[in-house]
Image (tube, rainbow, N blue to C red):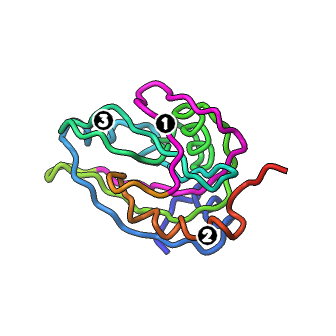
Amino acid sequence: MMELPEHLKATVQKYGEVPTRRRTVTASPSRVLDLQSLRGGLLGAAGLVWNSKGEVLLIREHPLADGQEIWTTPGGMALEGEEPEETFLREVREETGIEAEILDLTYVFDFTVTDGREEVRGFFFQFVGATRDCAIEPGRGVLEVRWFDELPADMAFRDDYLPVMEPRGRGFVVTDE
């Protein structure tokens, strides 16, 4: 297990043994500078949210610097003093208009963002969640929100989420009673 700051260890311990990965992503110098200025360091959370039909909720954000529009999971960076679980739930609410509940923590990434000269390092938590709400609405900065039966080919970090799609029929979906 990677060495986590003390305040993040409780989140991981709550979910038991959680796989960890090291990841490095290249970004523009301005993006690296933005991330270096975050109070409390680089900490983020995102994840899959399922509805009672077993569909997964994804968002399409405004185009990246290269003009590419891709599907991604709801998520983003923590606010100062915010724990990973709080970040995930807030981001889901802000980006999709729904309330979700966390079912599991699936990965913790020891994350480095670099422009080739400068870098910033932090942690990113990948959750799975569920909702009974199905009325979705794009939040600020989100072009589209949609339920999917399968993960689309043009999804960011798709390979990270493919193993998580398998347990849908084994208790990960909140059902309407």
Q: Earlier in the sequence, mark 2 or mark 1?
A: 1
Residue 82 versus residue 55: which sits nearer the camera? 55
- Labels 3 & 1 near each other (Cβ < 8 A): no
Disc on res. 155: none
The three-letter amino acid code for the residue at tag 1 is Val
Mark 1 falls on what kind of element? strand
- Labels 2 & 1 near each other (Cβ < 8 A): no
Q: Which of labels 3 and 1 is toward the front? A: 1
The three-letter amino acid code for the residue at tag 3 is Asp
Q: Residue furthest left?
A: 117
Query: Which residue is drawn at the image coordinates 43% and 30% (left, top)?
Result: 142
Q: Which of labels 3 and 2 is toward the front? A: 2
Disc on res. 34: 3
Disc on res. 145: 1
Report the magenta residues as a range. Answer: 120-149
Label 3 to label 2: alpha-carbon separation: 37 Å
Q: Residue furthest top?
A: 140
Residue 2 versus residue 147: which sits nearer the camera? 147
Label 3 crowding class (10 Å Cα cut-off): few <14, some 14-19, many 20+?
few
The three-letter amino acid code for the residue at tag 2 is Pro
Residue 68 sits in which quadrant? Answer: top left
Q: Position of residue 97 (x, y in %)?
A: 60, 31
**Considering only vertical position in the picture, is 25 above or below 99?**
below
* Residue at which label 2 appears: 167
Label 2 to label 1: alpha-carbon separation: 23 Å
Q: Specify whether residue 143 is painted magenta.
A: yes
Mark 2 falls on what kind of element? helix
Q: Earlier in the sequence, mark 3 or mark 2?
A: 3
Q: Earlier in the sequence, mark 3 or mark 1?
A: 3
Q: Position of residue 171 (x, y in %)?
A: 72, 66
Q: Position of residue 146 (x, y in %)?
A: 50, 40
Mark 3 falls on what kind of element? helix
